[in-house]
Image: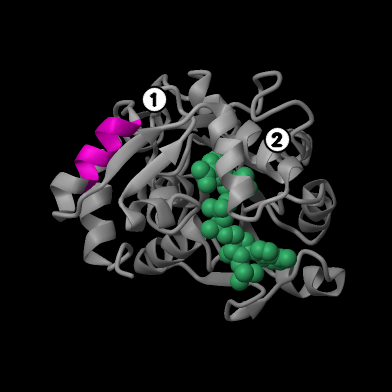
Amino acid sequence: MTQNTTLGTVLVTGSSGTTGRRLTELLRQGGHDVRAASRTSEHRFDWLDRSTWEPTLKGVDALYLLPYDPEPLTADFVRAAVDLGVRRIVLLSGRGVDVPGYGGEGNEAVAHHLAGEEAVRTSGAEWTILRPGWFAQNLSVGFLREDVVAGELRLADGDVPVAFVDAEDISAVAAEALTGSGHSGQVYELTGPRALTLDEVAEAISAGTGRSVRHVRLTPEEFVAEKVTQGMSEEDARGYEAVLSPIRLGLDSHVSDGVRLALGRPPRPFSAFVEDAEASGAWNR
Ligand SMILES: NC(=O)c1ccc[n+]([C@@H]2O[C@H](COP(=O)([O-])OP(=O)(O)OC[C@H]3O[C@@H](n4cnc5c(N)ncnc54)[C@H](OP(=O)(O)O)[C@@H]3O)[C@@H](O)[C@H]2O)c1
C-alpha cells in the first residue's frame, strides 16, 4: 500500500485513549503532522463543548474519529469536518453493531455507532470503518484490569472463546487507512489471530507474567448479584451484564480477517499483548 505524500494535518480524537495514544505515536514516527485532541490532550477538544469543534477541525486533512458513546454526536461532527475541508475519515466503530440485539436490546453505544457509520458513509469524504472486537487492553487498562490484579477473572462468559484484538493492531490499521491508499469504502472487522476461552486468557497471563490468575465462571445472575454487592445498582448491573452478553452468546468467537486485509500481515498473538502489558507495569498495584 502506497503512502499518501500530500497528506496534511491528521486529527486524532481520543488521543489520550487506548487506540488514540498508540495511533498518535505511530503517525508521528511516520513523520506526519498530528493534532492530538481530547479534553486532556495537547489540543483541547470536548465533545460536549461545541465551541471546541471548529478550532479542532480547522486545517485538518484526515480524521481519526473516536466516537463519544453516551450521545449521538458523530453525525454533526462529521458534517462540520467535511464543511471545514476534511477529506478522509477513519471511524472507530465496533464489531457486532450490525447484529440485532448485540450488547442487549436498546444498547445506546451500538445505536450511536450505527448512526456514526451511516454519517461517514454519506459524508462525501473518503471513509474507512474499523469494527474491532473486544480489546485485549480491557484486561490491562480497561474494565477487567482489577480482576487480573486481584487474580480472578470473574465473568458470566459461559466458557465461550473470545477473539480479543490488540489495540496495537487497531492503531496500525487506523494509521494505514489514514495515510495509505486502497482503504476508501472498506469496513475492516478486527480481531486477534484466534479466539481464547477465559481459562486460556488466565493461563496466558499467568504464564507470561508469573502472576497467578484464574478464571471463575459465574452465571449471569451470580455476576449481577456480585456487582450489586459491590455497590452497583441492580439496573446498572443488569445493563453491564447485557453489554458483556455477546461473549457468553458466542457472538465474538469468530476470527475476522481485517488486520490481514489492511496490513498484509497477521494480527499479533495474545502473548505479545501480555508481554507488553507486563513490561509497562499495567498489572502492578
Ligand atoms: N473496549 C472495547 O473492547 C471496545 C470494543 C469495540 C469498540 N469499542 C469502542 O472503542 C471506543 C473507545 O473505547 P475505549 O473504552 O477504549 O476508550 P478510550 O479510547 O481508551 O478512551 C476514551 C477517549 O475519549 C476521550 N474522551 C472522553 N470523553 C471525552 C469528551 N467529552 N470530549 C473529548 N474526548 C473525550 C478520552 O480522553 P480525555 O479523557 O482526555 O478527554 C479518551 O482519549 C468506544 O467508542 C467503544 O465503543 C471498544
Magenta-highlighted residues: 198-205
Q: How is the image coloured?
A: one colour
Mark nearest the camera among 2 and 1 is: 2
Question: Which of the 4 image quarters holds residue 235?
Answer: top right
Tell me if residue 77 comes above or below residue 35 in the rendering: above
Residue count near mark 1 (Cα–Cα under 10 Å), binned few <14, some 14–19, many ≥20 = some
Q: In x, y percent, where is residue 239? A: 70, 38
Residue count near mark 2 (Cα–Cα under 10 Å), binned few <14, some 14–19, many ≥20 = many
Tell me if residue 116 comes above or below residue 38 in the rendering: above
Image point (51%, 26%), residue name:
219
Tell me if residue 266 comes above or below residue 42 in the rendering: above
Q: In x, y percent, where is residue 89? A: 64, 48
Could you tell me the amino acid type at mark 2?
Val
Along the viewing direction, whichever of 191 and 29 lies nearer the viewer: 191
Q: In x, y percent, where is residue 45? A: 71, 72
Give the dominant element type of the magenta stretch: helix, strand or loop. Answer: helix
Q: Is residue 25 magenta?
A: no
User: Residue under circle 1?
Assistant: 257
